Image (cartoon, rainbow, N blue to C red):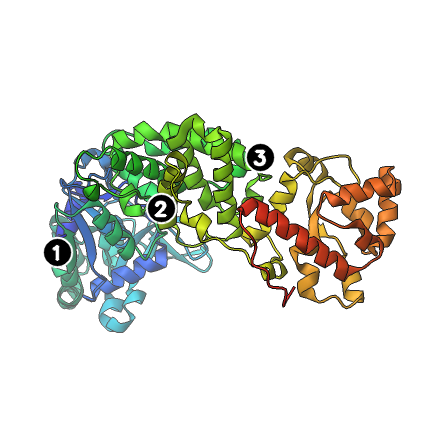
Amino acid sequence: MSFESPQHDLSYLMRNIGNGKIQLPDFQREWKWDDDRIVSLLASISMGYPIGVLMALDVGGDVNFAAKPLAGVDEENALATPERLLLDGQQRMTSLFQALVSGQPVNTRDQRGKPVRRWYYLDINKALANPSDREEAILSVPEDRIVRGDFGRRIVHDLSTLNGECMSDIFPLNRVFDVSFRQTWTFHYLQIDPIGTHERMSRLGRFQEEVLTHFERYKIPVIVLTKDTPREAVCTVFEKVNTGGVPLDVFELLTATFASEGFNLKNDWDKHWDRLRRKDVLGNLKSSDFLQAVSLVATWDRKRNWPGAKSDAPGVSCKRKDILRFMLDEYARWAGRVAEGFEWAATFLAEEGISDARNLPYRTQLVPLAAVRVVLGADIDNHGTIKRIRQWFWCGVLGEQYGGAIETRIARDLEQIIDWIKHDGEAPGTVTTASFNSSRLLTLKTRNSAAYKGIYALLMRNGCLDWQKHKTLSKESSLGFRVDIHHIFPKSWCNKHGIDSNHRESIVNKTAISSDTNRSIGGRAPSDYLSTLEKKAGISADHLDEILATHAIDASTLRGDDFNRFFEHRKRQLIKTIEHAMGKPVNINDENT
């Protein structure tokens, strides 16, 4: 990557923004500076103070972002194809263009966030009196150019005419680069008061020298990335310097790239999302997740079909830099099949007891799951294959391996899963390195943990029944009966009987039941609420005991109000459930449990 660092006159930048030679990448968000910041910026220019460095990109190289003029530019007069794209400095340059050049009032916001339209002026006398208070000399004037006081009842300055400006000793900043107008304004200013012409000439001379000259001679340093700068380097640099706005994600950057080829990525994603969002478990899926899955499949296919030596083949990846290297034809080839892969993933998760986004352990694990489906096709549903997919999935969840930065794991898992299934290779690292320690059960207390959600899902998958309603706790019954995770030994009972908070709040002492059942339980002892449930459900004690067993609960420990025996028994049952799901033994550590 190479770059240049020229200094450009402010007037040059304003002119080239106005004619469209300098534009913005289409992914740049809208200009949003408020009135106070514009006043402060103009004050800095008027004193010759630095306002920071700009960053731009020469058009015509590897990067072909769609472009758009800066806000306030007359698009009919702007070039269709710019010469440079402004990567950093949009807020400053747009503010200056609108205030100094556009010839229109500036669309901004006041201190309360209310939209306002403003002209900006310089009070000559205030500007000359004390440069350190220059912001006081910058006047933000309403659209009608009339400054009012006394709650709008009194006109302080009427700047709607040339005569009014000159009489008030107030210069319009939107004409600062208009040489012809400044000559007219100067002539009128000197002639308006023949008696005081000499004094006014002296004042205007000082104003020209001490204030307006700073606008005329003001230079701004610009770092220009040349045409040979790679796309991923441009995007990386942009994100590092774009500290004043909301960070852009890879989807927005790729959208701008594809737009230059006439393809609307956002519309295409919306089409796929309209299908995918119908699956509740995919409710939190992001456009960047979708692109990661497409990248996985595209790079896997690229590597598989590499014509040269395998050692030289590109790697499988879903990292940002590789997504930004996408060619449009690659995206078009795989996007539809990836969408189908996510739909299959939703079905797979429902079979594993996970039917909504709230209870999905890891959103990130959807990415390799969908990609594996694309690569394997319908063969993924074969008995032996789906058994291995399940093991990989639960090792990832219960081993808590899909949190944090996991792009490398995702790519490695895809390759290793395919080799494991197609060529009977070694199990993926996510399977071989996964472990679960029995002491972890004591610390699983809320849905913030993937393993907590995973154990809850396993109970749902294994067909646990509500204690009062004759319903398996599936997605449908969860919606109808407002199923949630509740204490088995109620919290108030535990507090009365000295049960410590770690055991009380552990997932071992929680299970899924309907809201009606939970109300029937209340804060009473299990021995008390079980008899109530038997009457409300119209079932025998033995029948209720069978229902409790679907939750891995020994009913005798509840009927005897024996928390310690209950906890120990259920812990062992949950461990068996975890071992079965992971296909490997749990590390037993009974010191804390």
Q: Position of residue 502 (x, y in %)?
A: 66, 64
The residue nearer to you, when weighing 173 against 316, is: 316
Residue 345 is at least partly visible in this image:
no
Q: Position of residue 83 (x, y in %)?
A: 14, 42
- What number of labels is visible? 3
Secondary structure at numbered mark 1: strand
Instruction: Name the amino acid type tagged 1.
Output: Asp
Label 1, label 3: how many angstroms apart (C-alpha)? Answer: 65 Å
Instruction: Name the amino acid type tagged 3.
Output: Glu
Q: Position of residue 517 (x, y in %)?
A: 78, 44
Instruction: Name the amino acid type tagged 2.
Output: Arg
Task: Specify which label sits upstream in the sequence, 1 or 3.
Answer: 1
Q: Position of residue 38 (x, y in %)?
A: 31, 57
Local crowd at mark 1 within 10 Å, few (<14), some, or many (≥20)?
A: some
Q: Is residue 347 left or right of residue 58?
A: right
Task: Specify which label sits upstream in the sequence, 2 or 1.
Answer: 1
Residue 147: image quadrant is: bottom left
Indicate the quadrant containing the C terminus: top left, top right, bottom left or bottom right: bottom right
Secondary structure at numbered mark 3: helix
Residue matched to label 2: 412
Label 2, label 3: how many angstroms apart (C-alpha)? Answer: 25 Å
Instruction: Look at 53% across and 46% down and name the residue there.
Output: 583
Task: State yes or no: discs 2 and 1 in contact (Cβ < 8 Å).
Answer: no
Residue matched to label 1: 9
The residue nearer to you, when weighing 581 against 200, is: 581
Instruction: Look at 31% across and 44% down and name the residue there.
Output: 317
User: Which of the numbered marks, if any, corresponds to residue 301?
Assistant: none
Label 2, label 1: how many angstroms apart (C-alpha)? Answer: 51 Å
Residue 500 is at least partly visible in this image:
yes
Instruction: Look at 60% across and 63% down and name the residue there.
Output: 589
Residue matched to label 3: 351
